[in-house]
Amino acid sequence: MFGLSKLFSSKSVQKQPIITALAAYRSAVFAVGVDEKFINDVELGKDKSLLISLTLPFAAQSEMPAVAAFVSERLNQVVTITACVALPPQCKFKKIKHIVLIASGKGGVGKSTTAVNIAGALKAEGAKVGILDADIYGPSIPMLLGLVGAEPSSKDDKQLMPFDANGIKAQSIGFLVPSDDATVWRGPMASGAVNQLLNETAWGELDYLIVDMPPGTGDIQLTMSQKVPASGTVIVTTPQDLALADAQKGIAMFNEVNVPVLGLIENMSHFLCSHCGEPNHVFGKDGAIKLAQRHGVPVLSHIPLAINIREYSEQGKLIALDNQTTVSKIYADTARLIASMLYYQQPHHDSVEIVITDD
Ligand SMILES: Nc1ncnc2c1ncn2[C@@H]1O[C@H](COP(=O)(O)OP(=O)(O)OP(=O)(O)O)[C@@H](O)[C@H]1O
């Protein structure tokens, strides 16, 4: 997949400076540069510009213009980079490469809004994406994806067909169970229902399945996080002390069940003043950063309190897919970071060899 056979199809291209320039690129997403094994082909255009084609092992297409600008400056030549996304073949569950839980210590912090927009942003970054709404207390994914009233269907009476929302495959516990029933559920019952939904939906091939978890850190959430074969979890919090205290419980819970915490997302982090444009930290400042530092996890993003996030949600549209908005860039940055962390945490990289000598 990442072979070098087709690499440098144009004989007149000098390969080493290109490899060196790509390797020197740095960002939070490409923290160790763009590896030469991602290069698919390099061609010289008629106008002497370089056309580099990459196959990325994680969803990060929207970063290519920045990589191209960097390489272009280094080589003093016009550079265009195109990229497709093909994750390494290992699957976490059936044909699903990664399952990512989106969780929160308390309700109402914007977990579901964040989950659908991360799913949308990963799709926009070139990945095959699904979303599973496991929030038995208040399944809101159907509303957020404009699927209210949709009826689940089955092709063969064995597997449920997922819904298609903007190319994202979606399934919700809300389609199957009235939410009033959920108040009396115990952990094993809830996690059994979610596992059934995970197992009995015809997801097909997915790079990332985002799971919108029920809020909180009780028996239900604990059992679910043990049972779903997740690659990692992202905890959504708001900046208030109470939300942060609950987010801390979330980190402890996932540590207990050995699900890696990829990071925190601080939602409703600040409000941008419509008059002066300055960020106003209505609910407090730096709390998420301090919490993250205490637990050795990163803050993946600070998402503002923005009227258009709520408006898009209420219309069943994904703001992450509207690249005219400032907010969509934040979701895109977050999605690329999550994708990159999932790739680099897998044990398929050349390990660093430590050599101990006598001198
Ligand atoms: N960054 C934001 N800016 C403005 N409004 C937001 C933002 N994030 C979420 N909201 C709004 O806050 C409300 C709650 O969001 P959401 O349903 O995603 O929260 P939740 O944490 O999933 O809730 P629950 O605990 O009930 O599942 C919604 O009206 C949503 O549109």
Image (tube, rainbow, N blue to C red):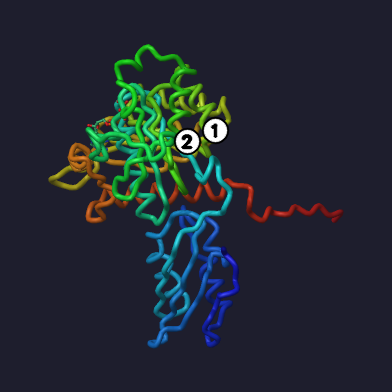
> Residue at the spot x=44%, y=49% of the render?
337
- Amino acid at the residue labelled 2: Thr
Quarter location, residue 355: bottom right
User: Quadrant of the image for the C terminus?
Assistant: bottom right
Q: How many marks?
A: 2
Image position, residue 171 (x, y; %): 36, 36
Toward the viewer: 285 or 205?
A: 205
Residue at the outermost right position: 358
**Does residue 159 appear left or right of residue 120 in this picture?**
right
Ligand 1 neighbours mark 2 (CB distance < 8 Å) = no
**Does residue 202 appear left or right of residue 295 in this picture?**
left
Q: Secondary structure at mark 1?
A: loop
> Residue at the spot x=47%, y=49% of the render?
205
| Label placed on residue 259 | 1
Image position, residue 256 (x, y; %): 57, 25
Image position, residue 58 (x, y; %): 48, 54
Quarter location, residue 280: top left
- Amino acid at the residue labelled 1: Val
Q: Which residue is mark 2?
A: 233
User: Is the C-beta separation of discs 1 and 2 under 8 Å?
Assistant: yes
Say few, some or many: other residues with alpha carbon within 10 Å of mark 1 (under 14 / 14 to 19 / 20 or more).
many
Q: CA distance from mark 1 to mark 2?
A: 7 Å
Say few, some or many: other residues with alpha carbon within 10 Å of mark 2 (under 14 / 14 to 19 / 20 or more).
many
User: Quadrant of the image for the N terminus?
Assistant: bottom right
Is residue 161 visible in the rendered image? The answer is yes
> Residue at the spot x=33%, y=36% of the render?
153
| Label placed on residue 20 | none
